[in-house]
């Protein structure tokens, strides 16, 4: 089931088709229907609703909670990247082969993985692009290299990490719910709300184990022009490479579990 037959539909086309089916099914109740047209506004809402949360957080901190030397533009992007990371991790951890796909030989868990990646990336890229246009309209100067590179590393970290946890948790509801609290702690320790540069050294050393800290502080350096010697983007990249190497092993393990379940049900 993990592989594709020679005469089967191309891999990417199949994954995109599954992504569209899942998106439509997930938002099937959110439709505006007339005699001539059916408009699924749920997909639009799902794409752009995180921007409301980003705008709310940004407004609170802009009004003084964070204090001076607050760069609104980069704070907005760091929040956007975090929500993308969190959503991708959560969705990937909960990935499973839907029942209506289990009897189709040409569709396997790898299709579902790629479909979820496509379904998460497209809205994120749309939000990212819209945010760039808005901030440029308000005359913010942006360092696109830092933003694109930081976004890529953050999303890949979330994707590979989620794949590993998907296999490790094995649909265990308790572990998945407990992991939600871990993500909240990870957010607080990601140097977005609490800059690691303002922490005592003993606490800062603990925060620095989080690869997102290095990515976020590296992105900020484009605005501040300050580079701290304890911020190493290479640490986040090496962390990412380890996850990328380990994740195929966990994907193979998960795929074998699904194949066994399918055999037992047939």
Image (cartoon, rainbow, N blue to C red):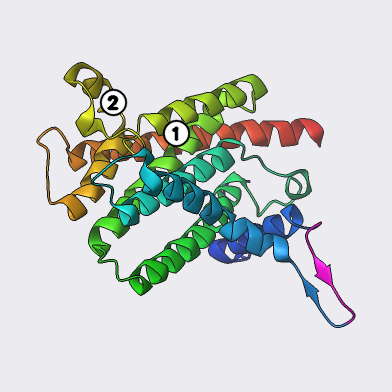
Which residue is drawn at the image coordinates 40% and 71% (left, top)? 133
The residue beneath circle 1 is 249
Which residue is drawn at the image coordinates 68% and 43% (left, top)? 97
Residue, far top: 202
Looking at the rendered structure, which numbered label has been put on residue 90? none
List x then y, in percent, for residue 167: 54, 30
Name the N-terminal-most of marks 1 and 2.
2
Based on the picture, tell me whether residue 45 belongs to the magenta stretch: no
Q: Is residue 206 left or right of residue 27?
A: left
Which residue is drawn at the image coordinates 38% and 39% (left, top)? 65
**Quadrant housing residue 37:** bottom right
List x then y, in percent, for residue 162: 49, 37
Looking at the rendered structure, which numbered label has been put on residue 207? 2
Q: In the rendered view of the protein, which quadrant contains the C terminus?
A: top right
List x then y, in percent, for residue 139: 30, 71
Q: Is residue 210 left or right of residue 93?
A: left
Q: Which residues are magenta?
A: 29-35
């Amino acid at each position: 089931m993990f592989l594709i037959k020679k005469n089967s539909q191309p891999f990417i086309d199949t994954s995109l088709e599954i992504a569209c089916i899942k998106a439509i099914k997930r938002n099937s109740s959110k439709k505006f229907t007339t005699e001539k047209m059916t408009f699924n506004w749920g997909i639009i809402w799902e794409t752009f609703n995180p921007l409301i949360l980003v705008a709310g957080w940004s407004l609170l901190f802009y009004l003084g909670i964070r204090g001076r030397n607050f760069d609104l533009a980069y704070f907005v992007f760091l929040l956007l990247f975090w929500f993308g990371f969190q959503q991708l991790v959560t969705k990937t951890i909960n990935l499973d082969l839907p029942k209506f796909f289990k009897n189709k030989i040409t569709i396997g868990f790898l299709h579902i993985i790629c479909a979820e990646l496509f379904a998460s990336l497209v809205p994120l890229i749309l939000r990212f692009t819209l945010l760039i246009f808005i901030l440029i309209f308000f005359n913010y100067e942006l360092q696109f290299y830092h933003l694109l590179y930081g976004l890529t590393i953050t999303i890949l970290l979330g994707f590979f990490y989620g794949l590993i946890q998907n296999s490790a948790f094995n649909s265990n509801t308790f572990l998945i719910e407990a992991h939600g609290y871990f993500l909240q702690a990870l957010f607080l320790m990601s140097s977005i709300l609490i800059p690691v540069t303002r922490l005592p050294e003993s606490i800062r050393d603990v925060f620095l184990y989080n690869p997102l800290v290095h990515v976020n502080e590296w992105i900020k350096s484009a605005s501040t022009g300050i580079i701290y010697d304890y911020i190493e983007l290479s640490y986040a990249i090496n962390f990412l490479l380890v996850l990328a190497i380990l994740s195929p092993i966990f994907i193979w393990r998960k795929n074998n579990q699904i194949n066994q379940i399918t055999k037992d049900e047939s």
